[in-house]
Structure formats: structure tokens, C-alpha cells
Amino acid sequence: AWKLVLLNVETISRTADKTSINVLRKIKSNKPELPVIITCGILLIGKANALNLLLLGESEAQQLGIDVQVLKNKIIIWTVLMVAVSVAFTGIIGFIGLAAPHLARLIIGPNHKSLYISSALIGAILLCTADIISRSIAPTEIPVGIITAFIGGPIFMILILMQRKGGTYA
């Protein structure tokens, strides 16, 4: 039984290097993904006012001069491109990209100008917290994705319960 425990600890430590922030240490100095992420981020921030108008409704935004379909297509393309490049660079770290914007909206409100920056900061705080927890719980490092699932799961349960009660979070 002792050998089985040692084998499992060794397996966990080998997979932890592939599934945690340790991956970032092994990346080479040239980062071809950064221009894509930064460009898409700037383009999205530039559309914050249009997205705020879209919160009024599609017909209202269109009456105020927003081409709603073009805006939606641009936002989808830029977001998908940025997320795809980010996931290709860092790997799958579940729930951070889903939980951080919801938490930011709870704290900051629906204004997209402040929502982007607050989502990034809250995501960074969640990821650093999950990484610290994954390094300190067990003798070997637990994959950070497991910890983020434990953090993100309850957040989504709270959001679902709030919506069922008819309440809104923004």
C-alpha cells in the first residue's frame, strides 16, 4: 500500500508541472501571443461605450447609432481570438474566465469601462489564490485547475440561486 501512495504522489507531481502556473516558467522569452491579446484587449476596451449602450437593448442602441450586428460580430471575433490565444498559452484553468467577470459585475456594476479592468484584477487574484492553495494543501502540488473548480463551482451555484429567486446581480 505504501508503494501505491508513493506512486500516486509521483504521478501528481509530474502532472502538476503541466497543469499549474509552473508552465509559465518554462515558456521561452519570445511571446508571439502577447500582441494578439493586447490588440484584442484594446479593441474591446474601445467598444466599452457601445456595449454600455447595448445594455439598453438592441433597438435602443440601434436608434442611438450603433450597428448592433456589426458590433456583436466584432466583439465575438475579438473575444474568441483573445480567449483562444490565452488558453493556447496558459492551458485550461477552469472557472477563472467565467467567475471573474461575474464577481466583477457584482462588485463594480455593469459599466464596461471599469468592468474589463476589474475582471482582469479579480481573475488575477483568484488565480494567485488558487495557486497558493494548490501549493500548500498537500506535500506535492495539486493541479491549479482542481482548486479553481472548487472556487468557481460555489460561485456559479450562488449566481444560479440568485437568478431563481428573481434577483439580479447587476
Image (tube, rainbow, N blue to C red):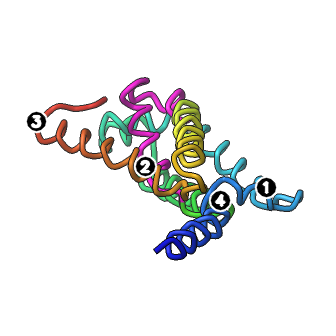
Residue at x 57%, y 66% (from the top left corner): 9
Distance Cα–Cα, label 4 vs label 1: 11 Å
Residue on which disc 2 sits:
98
Which of the two labelled residues, at mark 1 and mark 2, occupies the earlier sequence position? 1
Residue on which disc 1 sits:
25
Specify the amino acid type for callout 4.
Answer: Thr
Q: Quadrant of residue 169?
A: top left
Which of the two labelled residues, at mark 2 and mark 4, occupies the earlier sequence position? 4
Residue on which disc 4 sits:
90
Residue on which disc 3 sits:
165
Mark 4 or 1, closer to the camera: 1
Q: Is residue 123 above or below residue 16?
A: above
Which of the two labelled residues, at mark 1 and mark 3, occupies the earlier sequence position? 1
Residue segment shown in magenta: 93-116
Distance Cα–Cα, label 3 vs label 2: 21 Å
Q: Are marks 1 and 3 in contact (CB under 8 Å)?
A: no
Mark 4 crowdedness (10 Å alpha carbons): few <14, some 14-19, many ≥20: some
Nearest the camera: 131 or 74?
131
Q: Quadrant of residue 78?
A: bottom right
Q: Quadrant of the C terminus?
A: top left
Nearest the camera: 148 or 66?
148
Q: Secondary structure at mark 2?
A: helix
Which of the two labelled residues, at mark 4 and mark 3, occupies the earlier sequence position? 4
Mark 1 crowdedness (10 Å alpha carbons): few <14, some 14-19, many ≥20: few
Q: Secondary structure at mark 3?
A: loop
Q: Residue furthest left?
A: 165
Q: Secondary structure at mark 4?
A: helix
